[in-house]
């Protein structure tokens, strides 16, 4: 067993062993539940992998290929900040051969579930574990926690691909070369998309280059692609937007003459609607420039249901709504037209 896996299991074992359901009662596993699978049975394909949010699931499916079945717990429009694991989720995690989650407190309500799953030496990995603290954002309003939305910077998210590749090679050593080949090919695609996003956002006129969203999920995107961001809510959707916050954002939009703001697929749009109404009261028209993918990707099986498709969609939508230049159907020509440039 690798040092990293031992460390991960040790940390998990120190945490509370009880998992609570939505009604506040303890949810255990039936006495006749089969024992968790361990790395000793890894050689029997297809082995079972369980993942959390769609961005993690997409990496793992890409690198694992046909060596494993990958079961993602969180689908389209699911908010990982607020997600509560079900009893069925717990069973899936206990029966998995290997588990991947994002980390950095993104799946904050699942900590105890990961604890149970990690007992007995089951390999459990946070894909963000290798990203250096000097890179991570630590906004003051997030109470000392790191900003978990690192996938918004494609170059940073590619480091998570390295974690998944190394973990699968450690778990299924005989097929290391295959995992490395898939990783190399995927990393090349990520570099191409990173360049597309960078060039596309740069076409937005500087005076119009403001990204207004529902919650603060675009901090890394802002830093990587040079577009200032303001949001109604904080990093976690569990936070509530105050009336003063909405009023201040309305005043900012009117002052800067920002003509388009954005809703998010996994966040209630009520605060964005409140901003639009507030601007109308000041006789300024601002429209919804499109729906962006932040904490969840698009529908399973669709182009935007992949990480590359998600980032293509976001960059293309933002640029076209704010007066930049981008192909109507995105970099890969697979997007459905949603937003027209003015």
Image (cartoon, grey):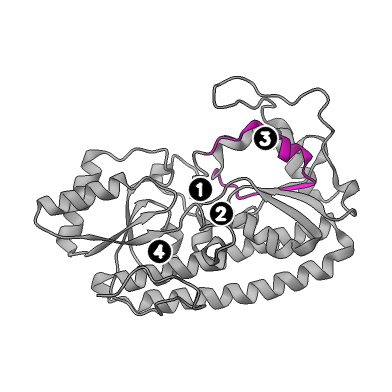
Residue 221 sits in quarter: bottom left
- For the C terminus, give its image quadrant: bottom left
Q: Position of residue 195 (x, y in %)?
A: 50, 78
> Given this view, does label 3 or label 4 mark the residue nearer the observer?
3
Q: CA distance from mark 1 to mark 3?
A: 29 Å
Mark 2: which secondary structure?
Answer: loop
Residue 270 sits in quarter: top left
Residue bounds of the magenta highlight: 83-105
Q: Position of residue 33 (x, y in %)?
A: 81, 29
Of labels 3 and 2, earlier in sequence is: 3
Q: Are marks 2 and 1 in contact (CB under 8 Å)?
A: yes
Q: CA distance from mark 2 to mark 1?
A: 9 Å
* Residue shown at the point (78%, 62%) measured from the top left: 66
Mark 4: which secondary structure?
Answer: helix
Q: Is residue 89 shown in magenta?
A: yes
Q: CA distance from mark 3 to mark 2?
A: 34 Å
Q: Which mark is residue 222?
A: 4
Q: Which residue is mark 3?
A: 88
Would you say residue 189 is visible in this rendering? yes
* Residue shown at the point (61%, 66%) measured from the top left: 158
Q: Which residue is mark 1?
A: 146
């Amino acid at each position: 067993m690798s040092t990293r896996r031992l460390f991960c299991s040790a940390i998990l074992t120190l945490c509370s062993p009880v998992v609570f359901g939505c009604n506040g009662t303890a949810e255990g596993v039936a006495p006749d539940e089969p024992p968790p699978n361990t790395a000793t049975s890894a050689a029997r394909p297809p082995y079972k992998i369980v993942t959390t949010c769609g961005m993690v699931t997409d990496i793992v499916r890409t690198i694992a290929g046909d060596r494993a079945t990958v079961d993602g717990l969180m689908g389209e429009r699911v908010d990982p900040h607020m997600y509560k694991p079900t009893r069925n989720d717990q069973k899936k995690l206990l029966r998995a051969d290997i588990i991947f989650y994002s980390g950095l407190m993104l799946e904050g309500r699942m900590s105890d579930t990961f604890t149970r799953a990690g007992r007995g030496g089951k390999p459990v990995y946070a894909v963000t574990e290798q990203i250096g603290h000097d890179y991570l954002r630590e906004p003051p309003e997030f109470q000392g926690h790191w900003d978990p939305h690192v996938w918004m910077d494609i170059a940073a998210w590619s480091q998570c691909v390295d974690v998944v590749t190394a973990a699968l090679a450690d778990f299924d050593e005989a097929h290391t070369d295959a995992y490395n080949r898939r990783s190399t090919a995927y990393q090349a695609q990520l570099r191409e998309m990173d360049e597309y996003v960078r060039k596309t956002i740069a076409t937005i006129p500087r005076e119009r280059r403001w990204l207004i969203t529902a919650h603060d999920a675009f901090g890394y995107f802002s830093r990587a692609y040079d577009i200032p961001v303001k949001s109604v809510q904080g990093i976690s959707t569990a936070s509530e937007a105050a009336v003063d916050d909405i009023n201040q954002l309305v005043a900012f939009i009117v002052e800067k003459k920002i003509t388009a703001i954005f809703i998010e697929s996994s966040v209630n749009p009520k605060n964005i609607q409140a901003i639009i109404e507030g601007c109308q009261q000041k006789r300024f028209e601002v429209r919804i420039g499109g729906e962006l993918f932040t904490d969840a990707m698009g529908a399973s099986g669709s182009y935007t249901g992949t990480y590359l498709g998600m980032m293509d969609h976001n960059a293309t939508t933002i640029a076209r709504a704010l007066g930049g230049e981008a192909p109507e159907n995105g970099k890969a020509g697979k997007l459905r037209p949603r937003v027209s440039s003015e």
